[in-house]
Image (cartoon, rainbow, N blue to C red):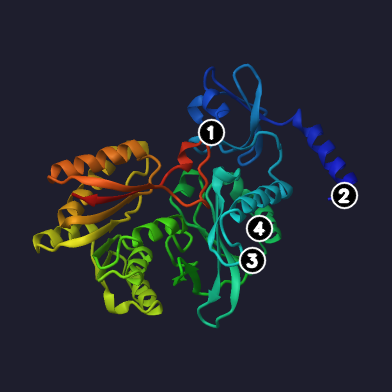
Amino acid sequence: MCRACADGRQKAILGTMSQMPSVQLKPKEDTRIRGGHPWIYDNEIAAINGNPSPGSEVVVRDSRGKQLGYALFNPASKIQARIFSRTSSRADTAFFIQAFQESLAWRARFFDLEKASFRAVFGEADSVPGLIVDLFNGKSASDGRHGRWLSAQFLSLGVDQRKSNIIEALQKVFKPAGIMERSDAPVRKLEGLEDSTGILSGSVPDSIIIEENGLAFSVDLLGGQKTGWFLDQRANRAAAARYAKGRQVADIFCNQGGFGILCAAKGAASVVCVDSSNEALKAVQENADRNACADRVTTLSANAFDQLRTFEKEGKKFDMVILDPPAFAKSRSSIPQAYRGYKEINVRALRLLNKGGILVTCSCSHWFDDALFDKMLLEAAFDCGKRFRTIEERSQDLDHPIVSGYQESRYLKVRIVEIL
């Protein structure tokens, strides 16, 4: 941008700042926001000044009128304002370009940008509230064409209204061959939005092949779960596979086999992959063939809770059990029920393990924090008369940055333990 244009834009911004609508907080509700948290709930607001339209930018002020930042406003949501910046007043194309450049610079420190697939934008943790973008480097399964594709979720009203600005910025910063939209998450309903899926720009193959931990996996950007592949478990899959050699492994809630197939490739004696989705199990079989380990990988189509009970009734034993369930806790009110669910599957998994066996257990719900997860695991072991040694305590990979003040960015918990 030329100096004159930049000066003109800044003057225009300054000219409208004094007229920008504002959200004023109640007394003592600013502490969390000052600490870095980006969400302002409806019950924390004392006044809304200036009649802001849904999705518009607003100034956030404390009870004394001191400015705290700029947010995107949605009166239909319980989270009525989502802070996108402490300094920039407009969430325009220039803002998104800068945010994406900064997010890319962080990933460049840890990943090969030309070969790796990674989360390119992690919502509030990358200062773009409600936007998830996964970047896939790979090749088309149909014609072998190499390329880079993006899979995006627009999960809040503010970013949904700015879709065209965001697409322009994504194209400029990441230069993809195509962008797929997967805005079909339940959280959109809380924002007053309908589901939206389809190709936003360029072209996207029906299936692409990516490389992860030295293996090849197929990814369906349109039909796969969420954005097509769970990138946050990349390093955890590698960690689990280090202990798999010579073991009989059960990969429960296996999805497309990211854990189980890597274990097989690293020398597991056998791997049984369990999931309730036949489409996911078809992908497991294809990925096992693709990585020359199909002779050691079998699949079972079943409800995971039911199959764990069946294994126990049959007297089945394993040397390694992997539990990677979906988020059981979707809200604070669901924590007690989630606790029971996590505990049940962990009790049953522990009963299936031989002495010296390895349990890899996960939770991807931010509501179910580390302390609660560890408490659950201790109780599960106690209830079935087992003790364990902790080998590793892990979280999500570095493309899902954990930011201070925003505890929701620390969501994934992974424990690798050995049965005594």
Structural crowding at the residue carrying mark 3, measured as other residues with C-alpha within 10 Å and reported as few (<14), some (14–19) or many (≥20):
many
Q: Is 393 or 347 nearer to us in this picture? A: 393
Q: Name the residue that disc number 4 marks.
A: 170
* Dots 4, 3 in contact, CB < 8 A: yes
- Observer able to see residue 130: no
Along the polypeptide, which appears first: circle 2 or circle 1?
2
Q: Is residue 56 above or below residue 181?
A: above
Q: Is 307 or 179 nearer to us in this picture? A: 307
Along the polypeptide, which appears first: circle 2 or circle 3?
2
Q: Which amino acid, mark 2?
A: Cys
Q: CA distance from mark 4 to mark 3?
A: 8 Å
Along the polypeptide, which appears first: circle 3 or circle 1?
1
Q: Name the residue that disc number 1 marks.
A: 37
Q: Residue at x 44, y 50 (%)?
A: 396
Q: CA distance from mark 1 to mark 4?
A: 25 Å
Along the polypeptide, which appears first: circle 4 or circle 3?
4
Along the polypeptide, which appears first: circle 2 or circle 4?
2
Q: How many discs mark residues in the rendered view? A: 4
SS for dot 1: loop
Structural crowding at the residue carrying mark 4, measured as other residues with C-alpha within 10 Å and reported as few (<14), some (14–19) or many (≥20):
many
Q: Residue at x 90, y 45 (%)?
A: 4
Where residue 320 sits: x, y (%)? Answer: 24, 60
Structural crowding at the residue carrying mark 1, measured as other residues with C-alpha within 10 Å and reported as few (<14), some (14–19) or many (≥20):
many
Q: Is 66 or 108 nearer to us in this picture? A: 108
Q: Name the residue that disc number 2 marks.
A: 2
